[in-house]
Amino acid sequence: MKILYLDEVDSTQNYLKKLLQDTKPDLPIAVSSEIQTNGIGSRNNSWNGIEGNLFLSFAISLKELPNDLKLESASIYFAYILKETLAEMGSEVFIKWPNDFYLNEKKIGGMITNIVGDKLICGVGLNLIAAPQGFEKIDIIVDKKLLLENYFKKVEKKVLWKKVFSKYKLEFRKNNKFFVHINNKKVPLSNAILEADGSIKIDGERIYSLR
């Protein structure tokens, strides 16, 4: 994975999309910035932040994804691999369905994914240094370059979805006290049933990640 390190950018995702359009670089490729001034979060929220936090976007060819990975659950897949990387460094972080990084009861980051042509683009924001009010920061000291090096080594192994999911489902019970936003409504996860493809069932309705 080639990683471009920037000092400041409006959005790593917008920067990466323009780079892909203008120069057509070899894939996979990633962009990381020290400061992000107009980042893209879930549900069209912004994800800006404090210098030194993680602002990252990366692009992978669809044909290079694990052959059993449903694109609807790509955010779970890549978020969980990052969670595993952080756990190996000593963090207690966990994933709140489908793609938010949490410590205890507070969000410390998130991941969004979208398809552009024949590529999957993933955007990650993670509070490594400090957090805005109402959020939390990671519980370990993180060397960002080492984190990304270890993370992308895992990504490049193309571990099958079923192996990632088998570990993710063991932690899904941690979602019981939380809610998820569906059609602009807060829906409790306490009765959610996790399906093998990463979707959940709530009151008989099957819901996929929209991120």
Image (cartoon, rainbow, N blue to C red):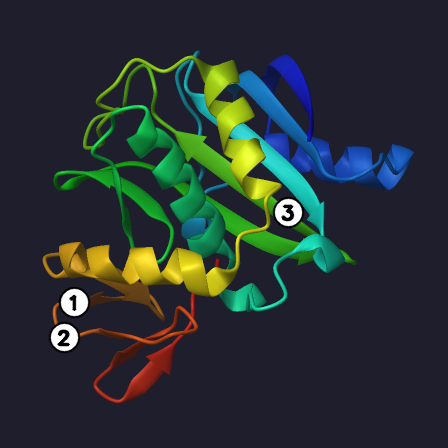
SS at circle 3: strand
The amino acid on which the numbered mark 1 sits, given as a three-letter code, is Pro
- Residue at 43 percent across and 49 percent down: it is 42
Q: Is residue 135 left or right of residue 36?
A: left
Q: Position of residue 29 (x, y in %)?
A: 71, 33
Residue 155 location, quadrant: top right
1 or 3: mark nearer the eye: 3
Tell how many labels.
Answer: 3
Q: Dots 3 and 2: beta carbons under 8 Å? A: no
Question: Is disc 3 surrounded by few (<14), some (14 to 19) or many (20+) residues within 10 Å?
Answer: many
- Residue at 20 percent across and 33 percent down: it is 92
CA gap, disc 3 and disc 2: 31 Å
Q: Position of residue 40 (x, y in %)?
A: 51, 40
Q: Dots 1 and 2: beta carbons under 8 Å? A: yes
Q: Is residue 95 left or right of residue 37?
A: left
Q: Is residue 26 left or right of residue 114?
A: right
Residue 210 visible, this angle: no
**Res. 121 mark:** 3
Q: Position of residue 45 (x, y in %)?
A: 42, 44
The amino acid on which the numbered mark 2 sits, given as a three-letter code, is Asn
Residue 27 location, quadrant: top right
CA gap, disc 1 and disc 3: 29 Å
Q: Residue at label 2?
A: 191
Quarter of the image where the N terminus is located: top right
Q: Dots 1 and 3: beta carbons under 8 Å? A: no
Question: Is disc 2 surrounded by few (<14), some (14 to 19) or many (20+) residues within 10 Å?
Answer: few
Nearest the camera: 25 or 134?
Answer: 25
Q: Residue at label 1?
A: 188
SS at circle 2: loop
Q: Position of residue 106 (x, y in %)?
A: 18, 38
Specify which label sits upstream in the sequence, 1 or 3.
Answer: 3
